[in-house]
Amino acid sequence: MTLRREFLSDPEDGMTAGREPKYRLRLYIAGNSPRSRRAVKVLRKLAATRLQAEAVELEIIDIYQETDRARQDQVIGVPTLIRELPEPLRRLLGDLSDERRVLMALDLDEDDEPEA
């Protein structure tokens, strides 16, 4: 798995065209391990179900391919999710399969409905 950047909202809806994303997430993973695949899957699901109307930029960084980036961001374990936007910067380290924990890290209320 190599470094890749993706917009998780539909690019056809115009949300990402020329606009700063509302959420900018950086996910550090370790290769193609089951935990890495699960972390990517969970984030994509949350973006589709909880952040539908928001522009979400997800940068996936494999620590085996991008060791300098991991060192620069002081990543000490994987998976690590860094929420760069909205500020303040927040980090979540470890298993991302607990949706409630990920929502808390993204500072989203579990009871909030996605915007239409």
Image: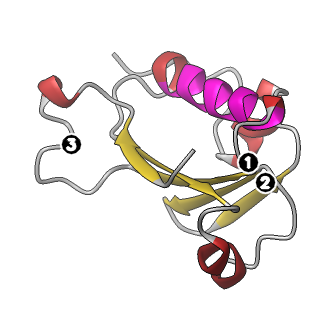
Instruction: Count up the numbered dots.
Output: 3
Which residue is depicted at the point 64% across and 38% down?
108
Q: Amino acid at mark 1?
A: Ala
Question: Magenta region: which residues?
Answer: 35-47
Q: Are marks 2 and 1 in contact (CB under 8 Å)?
A: yes
Q: Are marks 1 and 3 in contact (CB under 8 Å)?
A: no
Please tell me whether mark 1 or mark 3 is closer to you in this view: 3
**Vertical placement of residue 13 versus 21, above or below:** above
Q: In the image, residue 98 lies at what x, y percent?
A: 85, 27
Q: Residue 16, labelled with which disc? A: 3
Q: Residues within 10 Å of mark 2 (few under 14, many from 20)?
A: some
* Along the viewing direction, whichever of 51 and 112 lies nearer the viewer: 51
Please identify the quadrant where the C terminus is shown: top left
Q: Main secondary structure of the magenta part?
A: helix
Q: Is residue 26 left or right of residue 91?
A: left
Which of the marked residues, 3 or 2, is nearer the chain's N terminus?
Answer: 3
Instruction: Indicate yes or no whether the magenta region holds residue 43.
Output: yes
Q: CA distance from mark 2 to mark 1?
A: 6 Å
Q: Residue 66, labelled with which disc? A: none
* Along the viewing direction, whichever of 51 and 34 lies nearer the viewer: 34
Q: Residue 105, labelled with which disc? A: 1
Which of the marked residues, 2 or 1, is nearer the chain's N terminus?
Answer: 2
**Vertical placement of residue 25 versus 51, above or below:** below
* Along the viewing direction, whichever of 51 and 37 lies nearer the viewer: 37
